Image (tube, grey):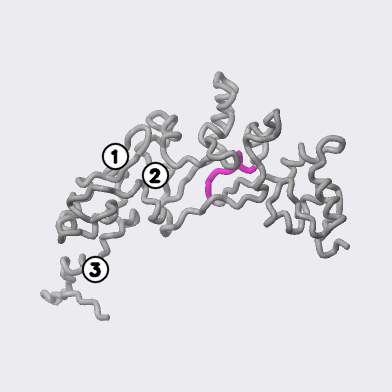
Amino acid sequence: MRTRIKILIIFGLICIHPRLSAAQIDYSKFSHATPKHRAACNTCHKISFPDIKDYPSHNACVSCHRPQFFRGARPPICSVCHSKTSPRDEARFAFRNPASKLQFTIEFPHDKHQDVIAMLRFSHAPQNYYNCAVCHGQRTATFKAVPTEHSSCFNCHWKSQQPVADNCNGCHKLATTPYTAAGDPTRISIKFIHEGGGEKKQHVDECTTCHINITKAASLRGLKPDVPITACTECHNQPGKREDLNKELFALDKNRNFTCAYCHAPNVGNLDPPASHYLIAERPPLKRKDIK
């Protein structure tokens, strides 16, 4: 299909008619990567405590896009924020619209925050200030919640500590291309419960006791909440006490179809135990097919 653009030739110069070239833009899609959209964030967004909960006001858009705002009965530009492009319906999508792709990555250094929390603990703050639960509250018995708003950040970064509230670029970095957020990480030890551990609630401890990779992470990129098997066997494979790992490996010795069930669901418990499990048990690794 030929692109229909009116071309004017004036004194030997070729010009694209501005009204027709603008018509080629899809105003139903908003991109922060557009050069004119890369001004300071508070140019459009109203930053309020404890969180930024809404889209920019109409004034922020009309200042540049008045022609698009009054184009037809249902202007496409309205669909960026509104669920219905109608002058009589003000309903908006949730902020941020969960159906839209993310345009920013978050630069969050766990290592620096861990240092600050540790420093507070050894001064005058209560014990729980040394725990990741300051930001990661309980979502379910199995999972901790991930902060989805600014309120937990603004407790420290509202005005006093950089990056402060109006320095959005301190944490939000424009991604190369829009992307879809990853879901919850795949659980390997699906039966682990943070609030469990018997009567003594032994799993209620400083999070980095087990999540040892978190404290040294300077970014969220590639960060996983994986826990090494050694963190588990510190309690769950002690000779003369709990020998949960050894018991399941011995059961597998007798029956290659045995499902490891103390920690794992069947989708993992029916696989070959990793070499790390045999290393902890001080045994050479085995494959199920080699067990007679």
Three-letter code for the amino acid on which mark 3 is drawn: Gln
Name the residue that disc number 2 marks.
Answer: 169
Residue situated in front as seen by the camera: 224 or 184: 184
Name the residue that disc number 3 marks.
Answer: 24
- Compared to residue 243, the image places residue 22 above or below, namely below
Name the residue that disc number 1 marks.
Answer: 46
Label 1 to label 3, Cα distance in Å?
30 Å
- The quarter of the image holding the C terminus is bottom right
Question: Residue 217 lies in magenta, yes or no?
Answer: yes
Q: Please give the range of residues in magenta.
A: 213-221
Residue 285 x %, y %: 83, 56
The secondary structure that dominates the magenta segment is: loop
Label 1 to label 2, Cα distance in Å?
15 Å
Which tag is nearer the camera, tag 3 or tag 2? 3
Number of callouts in the render? 3
Three-letter code for the amino acid on which mark 1 is drawn: Lys
Residue 76 x %, y %: 23, 60
Three-letter code for the amino acid on which mark 2 is drawn: Asn
